[in-house]
Amino acid sequence: MQFAAYKAEKSTVVIAGPGSGKTTVLTLKVIQLLSERIYSPRGLACLTYSTEAVREFKSRLVKLGLEKRKNVFLGTVHSFCLSEIIIPFAALYPQYKIPLPIRIISKAEKSHLFNAQNYEGNPKLDDVDKERTRNIKGISRVAIESYDIALKAAISFEELLIENGYLDFISMVKKSVELINNEPYIRKALEAKYPWIIVDEYQDLGKPLHELILTLLNLTKIKVFAVGDADQSIYDFQGAAPDYLIELSQRQDVSCIHLKNNYRSSQAIVDASEYILNSSRGYIASGKLRDYHAKLEFVECSAGMDEQYDKVIEQICQFRAEGTPYHEIAVLLANNKQIAELAQECSRKNIPVYIARQTFRLTDLIVWIQNCAKWISDKASVSFDEICSAWNSFISEKRIISKDDYILFKKAIYQALTASKIYTDNLLEWLLYLDKAVGITTTFTGSERYPDEIDNFNKLLETAQSHDEQLTIMFLTRLGIPENQVILTTRHSSKGLEFDVVILPGMEKDSFPIYYDKTPRKLAEARRLCFVSVSRARKACILIRSRNLQDKYGRWFSKEPSPFWVALQEFQNSRNDE
Amino acid sequence: MKTQPYICRVHIENFRNFHSVDFSLGEKQVLIGENAVGKSNLLYALQLILDPTLSEKDRMLEESDFWDGIENPMDDGQHILIEIYLANFEDNKNLLAQLADASVIVGGKETLKISYKFFKKDATKPDYSYIIYKGNDENRAFTYEDRKILNIRVIKAIRDVEAEMKSSRTSPLTQIIKQKYTISKDVLSEISKALDEKGADTLQIGQVNDLESRLQRLLNDMVSFSADEFNVSLKTMNIDATKLLYALRPLINSRETGNTSLGINNILYVALILLLIEDDTIRTFLSGDLYHELLEQDHEGLLERSYEKSASPDGYTLNLTALQDATLYDSLYAFFSDCVPTANGTTILAVEEPESHLHPIYQRLLYRHIMNKTNTSVMITTHSTHISSVAPITSLVHLITTKDGTKVNTTANIALSADDYSDLTRYIDVKRGELYTAKGIIFVEGISEEYLVPGFSKAKGYDLDRLGVVVCNINSTNFAPYCHFADVLGIPYVIITDGDYYHMVDKEKHFSDIEDASHVGKGFDGLDRIYQLHRSDVDPEYTNWDYNHQRKYFETFGTFIGEYTLEVDIFKKSTEQDQTVLCSVFDQLTKGGQTQRDNFATELRAGRYDKCLSKIESTYSGIGKGRFSQRLANYVSASMVPDYVSNAIDTIVAKVR
């Protein structure tokens, strides 16, 4: 099946279950297209969900021998819309009233603007944004019930943004879809540049991307190669839904390939995760752990989360004693508060933990700073030219470096980085020096293209400052790579990761799914979240629950097990019977 | 045939001959104009942007490249600007993919714009630099990468074709082999071995044979006008497997190019360049391997219908006859675009003076081929009226020197009715494009003026040839399309037309009488015609004026109107001495006897000029207007010149001086 996907000549949806090697399929398809089917200057566009995914994908492609060439776009849907549609065409077609110059609203500014409105029913900005995402007219027939209070606010808030001369990530995509729909020339230009569009994690990308893809399929000769898994659609809070991928896969002009081999987990884990879904997918364990006797354990505590944390630590120690390294153990929790609590508990017991999520995000600027740190430590690890060209693109908003002056510009960066070496033992001082030497704060303050970077940079400074022990620049160079540490993450953020052992605390009714999720759509989303969580495991999955829990006022309630706990126990019993 | 993208508009500021020009172009263009007017500089302006063979240094202009009309341009911070706009590019995927950043909207329509600017970057420093950029954003550089996809190839007027073809570095033959064919190393070493052992000098390689036959076909298509066909073969000068292909030389009728005529060499060279820049989406030759590979993807049997097994070992050649089926052609084109993607770009071909060393017949044939049978956009500069006279009248780019630098006038957007278009086309062809060489034109309606106006001018002391004024006889009074054409070309002109006096008899216009007090419903058809010509601009008071006033008024428009016909007006103007001359011309020519000669003199002296004219035109005298004027032209005097003709001559002479 992987091979069929690789050779596909027409638009294709690849339904890729957990551990099916989808990234391999995707990267090989890109290389195949670029080396055999598409000649420069034409290329292809690869759209992924997050900037992290973009970087991951890019480095894989480079390792596979992808050379730099024209019209190969690797990026998020937003950056695609911005750089390929809005920036080149907004000025050509003023009738769409896209505010020029392009200004992207910062998160702070956006919530400020939103809060000043007092919309009826006081909807939350997140909900309003979700409605804005879904409220796009187009081709798709997927109907999702809307949250009317938020929808009302969504419509007027969207107008308000444009009136104030702002674009945000949502209007960027919506305006792009509008432009593509109405302007044949833009479609021709896109078709010329990108005869193929590759989409990763289609289920995560929401309706605007879906409409963009449907429009291109209907009105151009562009072919689409989309990879995803409706069962792993867990970003409802951002407007994603499994239905879009399903709709795409059912089109006449799209062939659908289902990858059923799971190269990650033992058959027992595969079966357990499928049991949660409550519908058969026919996944087959095909990796070297195929016949591994997987452990599925149910741990009950009498009362409170603290006892659950103790049990978690007990489990960690036990697996560690059996030879599982710390970084192959992950604890998937409900939220960041629980992560913080567990992290504290672990540090008391001297168990090293890695918290996947920092207060700052791994944005382009942070990655750039990270690359600078890497370059200082090992010049061979990062390309200096790339450091320069990345910085050049950051500052291009305010200052254009001519080709004659570029060498001077490079020299200045070289000198700044070289001089910063004396601060490598103190992350905070190094960051402050770098800021002063190249002008990070001056570059990003008030930036319209990178409105949130300055905030993010300040958060990095806070992190550097607030740590108990003094951080070195090693903190940056190793960022994202756990070093024999137990991984603590939320269930949502665990997507795409895999571990030998997955521990799932908080498996009570009303905790998971959480009590306020009542609609069938929300319950299905929670079911998928559990599917994702369990399928992260290769060899073992430990579920933990308490019989009694306190509410936020300190009152105790007895708790039933989560329906997923019940289901998995059922599965376990049937397995033992055999 | 798929047409190619072309430059549809050019804007130049301060470059060499050009102060400020902005003009439209079509797909095929013929650049005409006198020496040193700036035809090559116009091409060079395009080369600055598009020619991949120019170096950085070439693109870095100097103070001397500024238009002469600006003093100390570089102290003043002046700039040189060249902008080109493209049309017909929307379906060219490679071009659009590469140049989408150059998109701009002009007049509601998307186009691609590329600019060259030589300017002072920093007002406080003396340094000049240049940028070439896409669209309106100076930061989107147009680079050599872009030039791979869109470029211009100029075949220079002064070219050493023989030397170029002999050097493997510059030979278009080598470039074709390199760019358009893939020949496996195994095949080459086999051939090399065979050549070494058998001493054979023909190359049994499918690809080379294909090129040979294409070249032969093209050359004969281009210039063969008799049953004699050129025989083209390719021979290698080096049998080493790695060099064999790069040492190919063409033989024409078994002679090496050094031994054939310069003219034929030139044609061969142009043919090779045409093959080099041809759209080769549909391959003329498929190696066996490729053919079978493609066969798997061909579900409609396109390949089997369009290719046949070639005589040479292992290969398939395109069957051109089958391809005349337009639907098959389109399907095959789409099939190849899809299955054998190429990184090909678009080349605009510019040929300077293709007439060099060529017999007029070859000039025309070569030109016709380039203009009509190639799908590339072409620009030709020429001094040959053999060429310009067969150019479509919508393809002209006319360069004219003015005080404000060279002006460029193009006919790409000329609006003409189908009838006017074909009249004009035939006229230009028959008159061998005399219009195009003119600095000024006197449009006349008949043969009499054609003979006499140059004579009158001479009598007035002007040499029209030296002044570049051409008398154009359009053989009718339908001046409008000709005037429009001259306007578009930017050539100043005057019109001389008969007054054609008439009076009404039985409600119908009656011509060729001399005015008489008894006449009713008098008028001048000439005035009426010219009124129609200028009707949108005529003064509302016009109808209240007398005829002389009207005539004078129209002279300010450059339209000069007589009273009767030219002959009658001459007779009317003639002095006694002139009348003697007129009589003697009549006497010399007439077949009639003495009585008729005497009658002619009598009528002339009595002022019955209409009778004189009818004697000239009568079968009895056997003279005719043409013959009379032809002879009279030798004897004209200044006093004989009717006032309106005299004014017309003075006016055009003033305009061209």
Image (spheres, coloured by chain):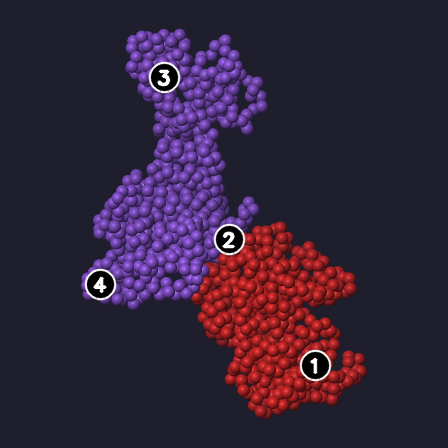
Chain colours: A red, B purple
From the viewer's perspective, tell me whether residue A9 is left or right of residue B217: right
**Pointer 3 chain:** B
Q: In the figure, A92 relative to A546: above or below?
A: above
Q: Residues within 10 Å of mark 1 (few under 14, many from 20)?
A: some
In the rendered image, which quarter is residue B188 located in?
Answer: bottom left
**Pointer 4 chain:** B
Tell me the kind of residue under disc 3.
Glu
Element type at marker 3? helix
Answer whether residue A256 is visible to the viewer in this image: yes
The tag earlier along the polypeptide, 4 or 3, is 4
Q: Residues under labels 3 and 2: Cα distance?
A: 66 Å
Element type at marker 1? helix
The residue identified by callout 2 is B102
Residue B365 screen position, x and y as percent: 32, 42
The residue identified by callout 4 is B195
Residue A23 screen position, x and y as percent: 53, 73
The tag earlier along the polypeptide, 4 or 2, is 2
The residue identified by callout 3 is B617
Q: Residues under labels 2 and 1: Cα distance?
A: 59 Å
The residue identified by callout 1 is A563
Residue B518 is tagged as none
Q: Residues within 10 Å of mark 2 (few under 14, many from 20)?
A: many
Element type at marker 2? helix
Tell me the kind of residue under disc 1.
Pro
In the rendered image, which quarter is residue A550 located in?
Answer: bottom right
